[in-house]
Each structure stands twice: as structure tokens, then as C-alpha cells.
Amino acid sequence: TQLLEQSPQFLSIQEGENLTVYCNSSSVFSSLQWYRQEPGEGPVLLVTVVTGGEVKKLKRLTFQFGDARKDSSLHITAAQPGDTGLYLCAGPLAEAYKYIFGTGTRLKVLA
Amino acid sequence: DVKVTQSSRYLVKRTGEKVFLECVQDMDHENMFWYRQDPGLGLRLIYFSYDVKMKEKGDIPEGYSVSREKKERFSLILESASTNQTSMYLCASRADRAGNDEQYFGPGTRLTVT
């Protein structure tokens, strides 16, 4: 069974700090997606990483796909209160219409 | 601006009631999904539809059914609601059946069954 484990589960930091959250699996994924879900809303796609070792940047957010395509990380530089939310990673299963989601990292950035 | 809308943000129903959750997308997507989201369990796929009147079971279809009579509308039905179906229900749509396309999610319906 393919699983995506995210760590940490919860993170509370001060504005301006840096942080990294992780998405790990024992299985190889053809791609991984990162979503952010704000309270009371559905998840919104931030990025898709496809190639092993790939690094993508979205303003202060840096996403990396592991060389073996089994893991990914999200690094936020100088976190702001607007970054608060639930960060989810997701990857396609063999039945490609199915995506498996990690349990998420709940981030709170304090002003 | 692409949109997935869900009929209710909050719903409270009694055990044994029949519950309809409706989802509408305006992107002309063929593929639509129903997930439930529970703390510690993440998002789990209930049902998937890849065309009008076509559906496939997801990971947790027991106790649920779906209806897709029009391309833009995908309904989730709880035939006889039970307390263990209290959850956040998320609808999503996607252009391609497979691949790396973005899934667009609705705002969710928080269902409480008492």
C-alpha cells in the first residue's frame, strides 16, 4: 500500500522564521503535488514536481522532489501569517486518476 | 475564474436520514471526485466519475452512492446517514483523467450526523 507521511504534523512559528516540511514514502511516485488548504476552504494546488531532484520556487516557497522520487520537501523562507494553513502533499497511484494524499502539516505563523 | 461550488457549507442531519450533497463545476471538466477529510486520515476518495452516468468506486464507497446526470454536476448521496459519516466532504474536478493536472476543489461541506 502506498502511503505518504508528512512531518511535522503541527508547526507553530513566529513571523520571519524559516521552516521545512516533509513528505515521505517508501514508494516511487511519478510526480508529487503540494496543496495548501486554508480554514473553511478546499485545497489549492501550489506546485507539481515531476523530475527526480527537481527544485521549484514560488516566491518564498521552495519545493524539492527527491532524487529517487520517494520524497519531497517544502521550505518556506521568512514565513508570514498569510502562510498559515494545512499543507498537503499528494501523488498519483497506479490507477492514475487516483491520488493519495498525505495527512498534512498544519502550520500557524504568529504575527 | 474557475469554480467548484458545493451546495452547503454546513449541514446537520439525523441518523437514518437520506442526505444529498451537490457539487457543480464550471470548467467543463470530465472528471469529478468526492473525498472525505478526517483529522489524522487525510483525504480519502469515496467515488470518482469520468463522464456523465459513469462512476468508479474509490477507497471508501460503503454507505455512499453518486449520481452524474449532467457533466457539470456530481452528487453524493448518503442513503441512510450514520454518525460515522460525520466529516468534511470535498468535491473536486480535473480536466484529464490521468496525469499531473490540477484538481480544483470546492470549499467543502461539513456534515454532522446526530
Image (cartoon, coloured by chain):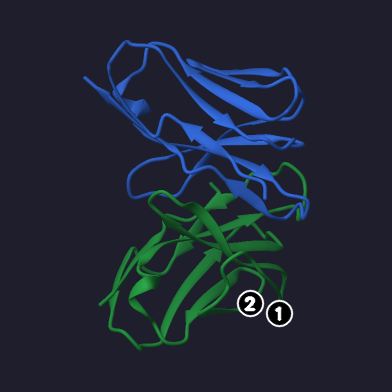
Where residue A63 sits: x, y (%)?
59, 21
Instruction: Bin the neighbour count of mark 2 within 10 Å (Cα to Cα): few under 14, some 14-19, many 20 and up.
Output: some
Q: Which residue is mark 1?
A: B53
Where residue A30 sits: x, y (%)?
77, 36
> Which residue is at the front of the view, B12 or A24?
A24
For the colour green, the matching chain is B
Q: State if disc 2 and disc 1 touch (CB < 8 Å).
A: yes
Relative side of B1 to B100, left or right: left
The tag on residue B68 is 2
Q: Secondary structure at mark 1?
A: loop
- Indicate the colour of chain A: blue
Relative side of B104 to B113, left or right: right
> Which residue is at the front of the view, A100 or A54?
A100
Q: Quadrant of the rendered structure where residue B71 is?
A: bottom right
The tag on residue A24 is none
- Residue at (42%, 87%) from the top-left corner? B80
- Residue at (55%, 77%) from the top-left corner? B62
The answer for how far apart the CA atoms under marks 1 and 2 are is 5 Å
Q: Secondary structure at mark 2?
A: strand
Q: Is residue B1 above or below residue B18?
A: above
Which amino acid, by three-letter code, is at mark 2? Arg
Q: Please identify the quadrant where the C terminus of chain B is shown.
A: bottom left
Relative side of A9 to A68, left or right: left
Disc 1 or 2, which lies upstream in sequence? Answer: 1
- Residue at (58%, 40%) from the top-left corner? A4
Which amino acid, by three-letter code, is at mark 1? Lys
Q: Disc 1 is attached to a residue of which chain?
A: B
> Which residue is at the front of the view, B101 or A32?
A32
